[in-house]
Image (cartoon, helix red, strand yellow):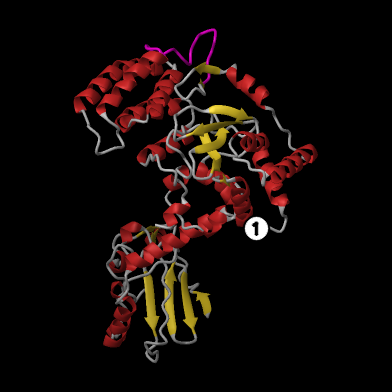
């Protein structure tokens, strides 16, 4: 391909392209001078006028479209084809007014001579053949799916997957515990490690452990809410994240974060979702949580005594040689207790910024925990919100919600006056009741409270949970793949 500039007309930069002697295109670049409003119809020969305004080359007619409108001060596009070129050899080069590649309409360019002889039936049939039978929405959907898959594959390359899908970062003891689990049998794959713990100890390592094992690498891509509901039990508040589950039970252990940004020295709590909403702090790290499980929740037999003893010994040895600093339960619990502003029905309490001098950040609810429990207990007479066959007394439900309304109003007033912890406390307490009828009220309290506390990750977690809150024990995202 060759190109040269017509220097005879200094008012224009006219570039000729010669492609194997078949196609010739004249391209005008955008000029700083204003176009003459008469354009090719201008009859002026005054040198000052010609120097001031742009004009097209003599003998070339420019199409009357918006790209060649003189008032736009842009340059048109001209294509010329040699007569001996066949349709299969014709090559077209298109340039928009800002020199960006853009497809142009063949009918918008009128060339002198016999331009129409190239607009043949054969060319039209070829063009139609290129678009017929194509589902462009399907093509677009495939491209979007490819883009989503590419992003997912990129996340799998690092621990950013955990932060992106679960909206939290894991503490150092979490990764150290996985290293310990991997060292039990160094030749084991990730799935084999998970299977070993489940078979030998009836303990499932779940959530972010399943990412480290590689299980998510083979999984179907799901909606964001599915990842946030992954192993989230019925009474789990947004502050709790499950890592251990006693197989086929509601007993589960997890990290407790008062703020989603916390990822150092985090307490581990325990709950049995089949019994109640109470959470108990049992360890200050994953190692102590595992030892607690072996002592309290593992059903030992004479045949497993040696296994347990050897495991405890190897775990203690790993802790002693590990570079990770292990915090003890009492140290962390004492530190957190100093910042708790209110007890809650799940008994873990809440932590929010509070100024003791100005007493800004939290004020007590207008009812005590005992009084609030009595109000919520009235729901029992109305029947279970999960049992469609139970007697459902709408009058009782309406009466309970009416009693709760002034409490919620007072909490909202407190929130308006910068006591954000009050609305958070009430929202968590109502969540602990387990009543689906209260989900809208819970959201109206938790969303603004978490927003004002700069905890937006907890908003996403609570919304996803309340959308599909289940008492089922089958809470794995991988259960969805089997459906």
Q: Looking at the picture, tell me which residue is in the foreground, 231 or 266.
A: 231
Quadrant housing residue 70: bottom left
Graded by Cα atoms within 10 Å as few (under 14), some (14 to 19) or many (20 or more), the crowding at tag 1 reads few
Q: Is residue 103 left or right of residue 282?
A: left
Tag 1's secondary structure? Answer: loop
Q: Is residue 207 left or right of residue 330?
A: left
Q: Is residue 75 visible?
A: no
> Residue 473 at x, y = what percent?
44, 43
Which residue sits at x=19%, y=24%? 395
Magenta run includes residue 356: yes
Q: State which quarter of the image contains the C terminus.
A: bottom left
Q: Is residue 326 left or right of residue 248?
A: right
Residue found at the far front of this picture: 302
Residue bearing mark 1: 189
Q: What secondary structure is the stretch in magenta mostly built from?
A: loop
Q: Does 219 sit above or below residue 337?
A: below
Q: Is residue 84 visible?
A: yes
Q: Looking at the picture, tell me which residue is in the foreground, 25 or 342.
A: 342
> Residue 306 at x, y = what percent?
72, 45
Residue found at the far left of this picture: 395
> Residue 277 at x, y = what percent?
45, 29
Magenta run includes residue 361: yes
Which residue sits at x=46%, y=32%? 237
Q: Does 373 sit above or below residue 211?
A: above
Which residue range is magenta in the image?
A: 352-368
Residue found at the far right of this picture: 321
């Amino acid at each position: 391909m060759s190109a040269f500039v017509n220097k005879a007309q200094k008012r224009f930069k006219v570039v000729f392209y010669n492609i194997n002697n078949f196609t010739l295109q004249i391209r005008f670049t955008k000029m700083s001078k204003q176009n003459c409003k008469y354009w090719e119809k201008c009859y002026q020969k005054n040198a000052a006028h010609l120097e001031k305004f742009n004009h097209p080359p003599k003998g070339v007619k420019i199409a009357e479209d918006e790209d060649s409108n003189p008032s736009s001060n842009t340059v048109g596009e001209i294509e010329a084809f040699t007569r001996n070129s066949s349709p299969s050899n014709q090559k077209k080069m298109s340039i928009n007014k800002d020199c960006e590649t853009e497809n142009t309409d063949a009918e918008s360019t009128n060339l002198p001579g016999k331009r129409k002889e190239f607009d043949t039936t054969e060319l039209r049939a070829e063009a139609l053949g290129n678009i017929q039978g194509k589902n462009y929405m399907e093509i677009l959907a495939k491209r979007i799916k490819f883009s989503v898959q590419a992003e997912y594959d990129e996340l799998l390359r690092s621990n950013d997957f955990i932060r992106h899908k679960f909206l939290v970062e894991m503490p150092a003891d979490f990764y150290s515990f996985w290293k310990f689990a991997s060292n039990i049998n160094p030749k084991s794959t990730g799935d084999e490690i998970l299977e070993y713990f489940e078979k030998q100890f009836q303990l499932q390592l779940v959530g972010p452990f399943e990412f480290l094992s590689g299980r998510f690498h083979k999984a179907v891509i799901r909606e964001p809410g599915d990842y946030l509901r992954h192993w989230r039990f019925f009474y789990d508040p947004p502050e709790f994240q499950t890592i251990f589950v006693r197989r086929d039970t509601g007993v589960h252990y997890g990290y407790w974060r008062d703020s989603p940004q916390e990822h150092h020295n985090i307490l581990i709590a325990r709950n049995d979702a089949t019994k109640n909403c109470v959470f108990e702090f049992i360890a200050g790290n994953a190692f102590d949580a595992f030892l607690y499980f072996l002592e309290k929740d593992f059903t030992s037999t004479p045949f497993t005594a040696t296994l347990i003893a050897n495991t405890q010994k190897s775990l203690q040895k790993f802790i002693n040689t590990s570079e990770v600093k292990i915090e003890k339960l009492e140290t962390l619990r004492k530190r957190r207790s100093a910042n708790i502003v209110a007890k809650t029905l799940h008994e873990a309490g809440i932590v929010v910024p509070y100024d003791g001098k100005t007493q800004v950040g939290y004020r007590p609810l207008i009812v005590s925990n005992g009084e609030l429990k009595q109000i919520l207990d009235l729901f029992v007479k109305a029947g279970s919100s999960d049992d469609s066959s139970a007697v459902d007394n709408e009058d009782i439900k309406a009466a309970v919600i009416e009693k709760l309304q002034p409490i919620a109003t007072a909490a909202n007033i407190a929130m308006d006056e910068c006591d954000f912890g009050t609305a958070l406390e009430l929202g968590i307490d109502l969540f602990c009741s387990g009543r689906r009828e209260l989900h809208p009220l819970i959201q109206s309290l938790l969303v603004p409270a978490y927003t004002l506390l700069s905890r937006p990750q907890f908003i996403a977690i609570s919304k996803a949970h309340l959308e599909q809150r289940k008492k089922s024990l089958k809470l794995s995202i991988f259960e969805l793949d089997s459906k």
